[in-house]
Amino acid sequence: MIRGGIIALGLCAAVSATAQDTTLFVHGHIYTADPSRPWAEALAVSGARIAAVGSDKELTRRWRSGAHVIDLKGRTVIPGIIDAHMHLLFGALEIAGFNLSNPEHSVTPADPAALIATIQAFATAHPTDRILVGRADFSSQQPTAPTFALLDQAVSDRPVIVHNSTEHSLWLNSKALALAGITDQPVSDPGEERYVIRDASGRPTGLLLEAAQELGNRAVLSAFSTEEKLALIRGAARYLNQFGITSIVNATGNLTEIELYGLLRDRGELTVRTRTAFGAVAVPQRLTPQLLADLETARTRFHDEWVSANLVKFFVDGSSGMYPPLVYRAADYIALVEELDRRGFQLMAHAERKDSVHLALDAYAQALRVNGPRDRRSRIEHDFVISDEDAVRQGALAVITGAQPAFCCSDVGTNFDPGDPTASDRWRTLLSANATLAFSSDWPCMWPPDPYVNMQQAVTRQIWRSPDTAVIETAAFDGANQGGAVAQPGKIYFPEERITIGEAVDAYTRGAAFASFYDDHVGTLKPGMLADLAVLSQNIFAVPAAEIGRTHATLTMVGGRIVHEERAAHLPSAALK
């Protein structure tokens, strides 16, 4: 992962300068996501913005010469995908590392020989990487959780840090434990020490859960230079562009990370728009003078179309073990929400359990009572299990659901309590309650961060099962994103909660833009908006639902710049009729 010199990534090519002339898309099937005019044949882009939307006849009459013409040949165009919840820096690290969990298969500790051989092969192919970072499915529950000993058999001379696909646990070898400063003695922060898994003698096993992951993450990130981090982020952004993704919300981060995006923006090398939340996985927020100063600095310095902040993330619960652990006492959490809301920050809450969702809604309701009405756009992330009463309350409070459809659906959805008959992932119920859906991948939890697989799962709610991960008792979800997952023909998880493809696209565009305070410049294709769009390989509005996930972006444009193109589709302006 970390090489002695620069990091070489094939996706890190510089972006060309913004074109000053007009690009004209013609002969298309363009979904604008603008309720006043949802469909068009043609679209004109001048500089960074959309100049006009209409028919071929209207736009070709206006731009008879001088326009750079892209003949869509009937292909479908949608607004650029806004991935409303992901972790770009984690994804950037893992895309340059080894991945043992992908759609084709998952190599788990249940097959130690294959796991060792795969990691060894990666280490051999990357002899100058000082730290090896990977991704895998493994149990986070004793006694089935793996230990450092298995990773030591694979690589003993360099640190190895493996991210669980949930991003709520890390698995370290002996060298990585030493790098993170984890010994037989407790670490200094009791909140982190609580989740350092130790054996009966107090020795670390190599597993870090929830807040303890910060020990490993800090050690890895401190070993990278600024330029190495920038190279990784550039490559990850271009990877996202391949899916038609043009904007993202980082669901974890801090001022240091935001400054990296600012540097790339200033160099003209950022190809996704970023909004970053302050927060770390399952680490309770503490309103220290340093945090409050960083929050103010971030929202003062970063509030443009490329890099923005003013967002704080809470983890009401985690996502490890047999049942997600709670992070806060209820009174403490409500007080924190009330104070940060008073200061004008947008808030988002990771909440998977039914009681966690209820608590998040209690906190938002209290903030409204105490601080009065304003344009908050408060969010609940995942929102896996919600009661009928709380679904109605969420709509009444205008709280947004940040959902990841590919996490659904196992036989029990994403409901952790086998004794609770409540359906999970209740997208139709929430829409009926007038809540806003904002879709996302939670990348690198979902791999790859494919919006079309997510859309298919939202439309079908097809039950999936992965033989590769069936032995992992603590898998929080087993959906279309998990390694080796296969569909169970004819099995649908609560079909009454399915939504339409149009609603799914809106959740990835207009809804996600609203959830991110992006809606004044992206999320719809109408004159004056920034020219963020994706040209698709097929008409997702017409293909059978089971084929939506086979879609891919053939061209992605961000602010009038083509940042991904599968193949040329250009015609000279003289071809206009």
Image: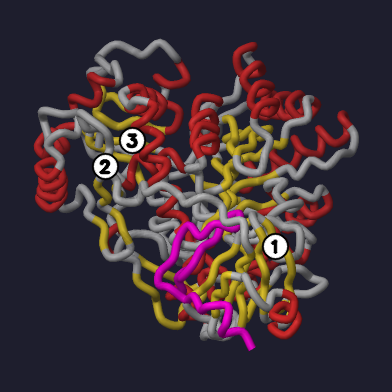
User: On the rendered image, what quadrant is the C terminus found in?
Assistant: bottom right
Q: Foreground: 128 or 469?
A: 128
- Please tell me which residue is depicted at 48% across the width and 57% down the height of the picture: 563
The x and y percentages for residue 449 are 45, 57
Q: How crowded is mark 3: few (under 14 residues within 10 Å), some or many (20 or more)?
A: many
Compared to 213, does 539 lie above or below? Answer: below
Compared to 331, does 432 lie above or below? Answer: below
Residue range corresponding to the magenta coloring:
551-577
Give the residue number, with chain letter if any, for mark 2: 8
Tell me, for residue 50, which label it has, or none: 1
Q: Which amino acid does label 2 sit on?
A: Ala
Q: Which amino acid does label 1 sit on?
A: Ile
Q: Which amino acid does label 3 sit on?
A: Leu
- Please tell me which residue is depicted at 81% across the width and 48% down the height of the picture: 397
Q: Foreground: 43 or 376?
A: 43
| Earlier residue among tags 2 and 3 | 2
The x and y percentages for residue 478 are 41, 59
Compared to 132, does 16 lie above or below? Answer: below
Give the residue number, with chain letter if any, for mark 3: 170
| Earlier residue among tags 3 and 1 | 1
Q: How crowded is mark 1: few (under 14 residues within 10 Å), some or many (20 or more)?
A: many
What SS does tag 2 mark?
Answer: loop
Snapshot colouring: secondary structure
| Earlier residue among tags 1 and 2 | 2
- Please tell me which residue is depicted at 51% across the width and 79% down the height of the picture: 571
User: On the rendered image, what quadrant is the N terminus found in?
Assistant: top left
Instruction: Please say whether residue 245 is visible from this viewpoint.
Output: yes
Instruction: Please say whether residue 403 is visible from this viewpoint.
Output: no
Disc 2 versus disc 3: distance between alpha carbons?
25 Å
